[in-house]
Amino acid sequence: MNPRRQFLTTISAAAPAAALAIGGTSNALAQDGSEKAFLGTWSFSSTVSNGFVFRELVSFSSDGVLSETNSFLHTASRQNFAPFGFNVVANASDGFGTWSRTGPGAAKAVFRKMMFDAETGQNFGDLLVIGTLSVTGDELKAQWSVAIVSPTGAVLVDLGPVTSVAERMA
């Protein structure tokens, strides 16, 4: 057998095992596969467990980066968290995080917003948001778990679940 044919035979036999070793995780990267249904910017209507509704814009990039902003908690919001059992009036940054597909039309996401005491400007922690998402065509649905955490990650207050429905921005 000539050297080129022997090389091709060896590579053909080894390729499936190498592919399993490299890509053997259950989560697909954002850019993997032909499904790119989540990519782009979405306009969300999000509802907190107490019935409060707010608007949110979320962008999903092909490299797994997520960016977020909303009408509820932002740099000038002065949001009073006392009704949630946390005695602070706060402002927050935009949200930044990651996302990955978990299957066809399904994904998981996590992002954080740095939180600041509205009176002193001091950072006291982050709003941590973890969710599961599903997309069908131009409609996206999400279930989020939301908590305020200290800079070390200790939960300061669990804000409970948030549900969202979104349309893709044209």
Image: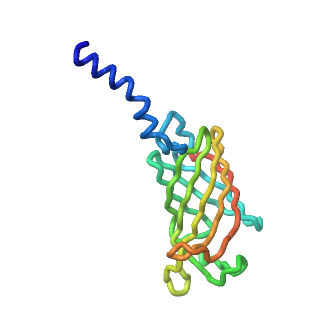
Residue found at the far left of this picture: 3
Residue found at the far bottom of this picture: 120
Residue 122 appears left or right of 78? left
Residue 164 appears left or right of 11? right
Q: Residue at x 69, y 61 (%)?
A: 162
x then y, percent, for residue 34: 51, 33
Residue found at the far right of this picture: 51
x then y, percent, for residue 91: 56, 76
Compare residues 64 and 19 and report the one nearer the observer. 19
Residue 90 appears left or right of 53? left
- Residue 45 drawn above or below residue 127: above
Res. 67 in view: yes
Q: Residue at x 24, y 18 (%)?
A: 4
Q: Quadrant of the C terminus?
A: top right
- Residue 19 drawn above or below residue 4: below
- Residue 17 drawn above or below residue 111: above
- Residue 139 drawn above or below residue 78: above
Compare residues 28 and 129 and report the one nearer the observer. 28
Q: Residue at x 71, y 76 (%)?
A: 84
x then y, percent, for residue 5: 28, 16
Res. 75 in view: no
Residue found at the far front of this picture: 1
Q: Residue at x 52, y 46 (%)?
A: 40
Q: Quadrant of the N terminus?
A: top left
Compare residues 76 and 15 and report the one nearer the observer. 15
